[in-house]
Image: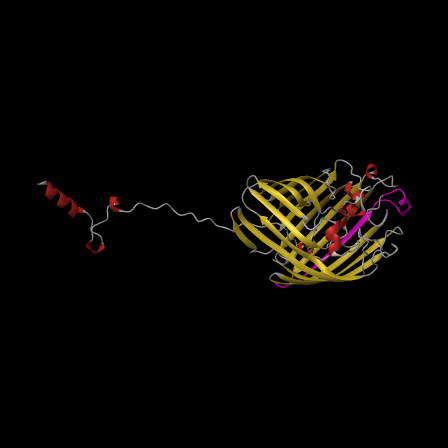
């Protein structure tokens, strides 16, 4: 058989494709192209600021793709009106008086953050009012100027790996079960136990999160003193999808005397609380329409930590129950009950630090907050009452500090984005 005959026989032996066409040999096929990897943007899980109530964080915050990564933008524009009995006679650092009623902003804020990649940051700026039970309530302009300024939070963060990170700057505190700004909480007003806690810290913080465990430890300046003399931390454990337990607290490791500083400085850096220790344990049940959070808190100030005429310190202990129930997608009801007491007796007034309404005083509060939400908009009302017992004259409610109760009626509305 000739060479030509053998070649024709080999070709004839190849399988015939549909339509009678000969198969395409591998050598005749074009080279395979490498798969194109499309980078996804704006997919980070946003957890700051924390929302812990019936008003929910925006599930789709604005996102800008930049040369340094995805930048997320959010904010809150909210206002409130309130009326209260027995307004305090205590003047603000700018000599502003606690009013019987006011219409004001609670939040006029925006925040910008980079929330993924190894290098991240968060900046929170704007106007704020922080209504708290049992304390004078000044204007948002006065509170912003006298507390933490127009940029209350600004920190950088290094995400080392999936579990560990380090952040530094001006940060939200690790302490407490109620959060700082009104839209973050079940109620418009913060409670009596909240008044024993610090709010914003300067410092350095290490974070850990793995599975059901999350924890942070920080070296900070306590009650915004500017001196790093506190250590704070928290740890939470998620028992299952509905139940979480936690512990948080802090203590000072050196003394700081704020009594020699200006009244404006002492508005945020309260001398007795700057030199205190605090611990709180909490439990949260969140399932379906329910949010339930009971917590217990203890605060102590040692004798050596006082710089005024008092020669002994003081302690407070208390408990609170916060709860919310969503009847529909648009209507819910929240409430809070709490009790707090201070050590000592009224006879210790000249020798003990007052952490409440004088040594030996105690107080009970009740708050109820119906809440309507429509997408990013919300409207809610609130009634709150505080009843104080064994009040030291001059440390209570009213212009003269002798009243033993206060009622407050509030309406807040606005939107988050």
Residue at x 84%, y 50% (from the top left corner): 357
Q: In the picture, which quadrant includes the C terminus?
A: bottom right
Q: Position of residue 80 (x, y in %)?
A: 72, 61
Q: Is residue 218 inside the magenta stretch?
A: no
Residue at x 81%, y 38% (from the top left corner): 305
Q: Is residue 345 inside the magenta stretch?
A: yes
Residue at x 21%, y 56% (from the top left corner): 19
Q: Position of residue 112 (x, y in %)?
A: 60, 51
Q: Position of residue 397 (x, y in %)?
A: 84, 55
Which of the pair 225/13 is nearer the observer?
225
Residue at x 78%, y 60% (from the top left corner): 408
Q: How many marks?
A: 0
**Which residue of the protein is positioned furthest toward the right in this rendering?**
347
Which of the pair 325/380 is nearer the observer?
380
Q: Is residue 73 left or right of residue 318?
A: left
Judging from the image, the colouring scheme is: secondary structure
Judge whether 15 appears above or below 302 on screen: below
Q: Position of residue 141 (x, y in %)?
A: 73, 55
Q: In the picture, which quadrant includes the N terminus?
A: top left
The reply to whether residue 192 is in sight is: yes
Which of the pair 33/289 is nearer the observer?
33
**Which residue of the protein is positioned furthest toward the left in this rendering?**
1
The reply to whether residue 382 is in sight is: no
Instruction: Please give the range of residues in magenta.
Output: 328-352
């Amino acid at each position: 058989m000739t060479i030509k005959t053998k070649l024709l026989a080999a070709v004839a032996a190849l399988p015939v494709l549909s339509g009678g066409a000969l198969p395409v040999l591998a050598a005749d096929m074009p080279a395979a192209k490498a798969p194109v990897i499309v980078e996804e943007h704006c997919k980070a899980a946003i957890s700051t600021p924390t929302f812990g109530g019936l008003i929910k964080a925006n599930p789709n915050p604005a996102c800008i793709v930049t040369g340094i990564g995805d930048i997320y933008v959010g904010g809150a524009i909210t206002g409130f009106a309130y009326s209260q009995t027995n307004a305090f006679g205590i003047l603000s650092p700018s000599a502003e008086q606690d009013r019987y009623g006011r219409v004001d902003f609670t939040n006029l804020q925006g925040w910008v953050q980079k929330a993924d990649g190894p290098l991240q940051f968060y900046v929170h700026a704007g106007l704020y009012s922080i209504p708290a039970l049992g304390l004078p309530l000044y204007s948002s302009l006065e509170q912003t100027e006298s507390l933490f300024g127009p940029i209350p939070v600004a920190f950088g963060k290094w995400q080392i790996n999936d579990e560990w990170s380090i952040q530094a700057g001006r940060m939200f505190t690790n302490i407490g079960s109620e959060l700082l700004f009104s839209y973050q909480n079940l109620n418009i007003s913060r409670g009596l136990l909240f008044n024993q806690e610090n709010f914003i810290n300067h410092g350095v913080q290490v974070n850990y999160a793995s599975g059901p465990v999350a924890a942070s430890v920080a070296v900070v300046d306590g009650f915004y003193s500017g001196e790093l003399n506190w250590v704070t931390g928290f740890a939470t454990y998620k028992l299952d999808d509905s139940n979480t337990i936690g512990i948080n607290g802090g203590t000072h490791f050196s003394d700081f005397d704020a009594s020699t500083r200006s009244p404006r400085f002492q508005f945020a850096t309260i001398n007795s609380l700057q030199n205190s220790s605090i611990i709180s344990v909490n439990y949260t049940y969140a399932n379906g329409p329910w949010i339930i959070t009971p917590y217990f808190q203890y605060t102590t100030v040692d004798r050596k930590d006082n710089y005024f005429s008092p020669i002994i310190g003081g302690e407070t202990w208390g408990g609170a129950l916060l709860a919310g129930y969503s009847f529909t997608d648009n209507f819910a009801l929240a409430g809070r009950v709490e009790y707090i007491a201070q050590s000592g007796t009224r006879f210790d007034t000249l020798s003990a630090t007052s952490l409440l309404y004088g040594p030996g005083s105690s107080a009970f509060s009740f708050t109820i907050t119906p809440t309507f939400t429509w997408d990013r908009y919300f409207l809610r009302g609130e009634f709150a009452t505080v009843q104080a017992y064994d009040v030291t004259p001059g440390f209570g409610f009213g212009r003269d500090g002798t009243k033993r109760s206060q009622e407050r009626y509030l309406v807040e509305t606005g939107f988050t984005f």
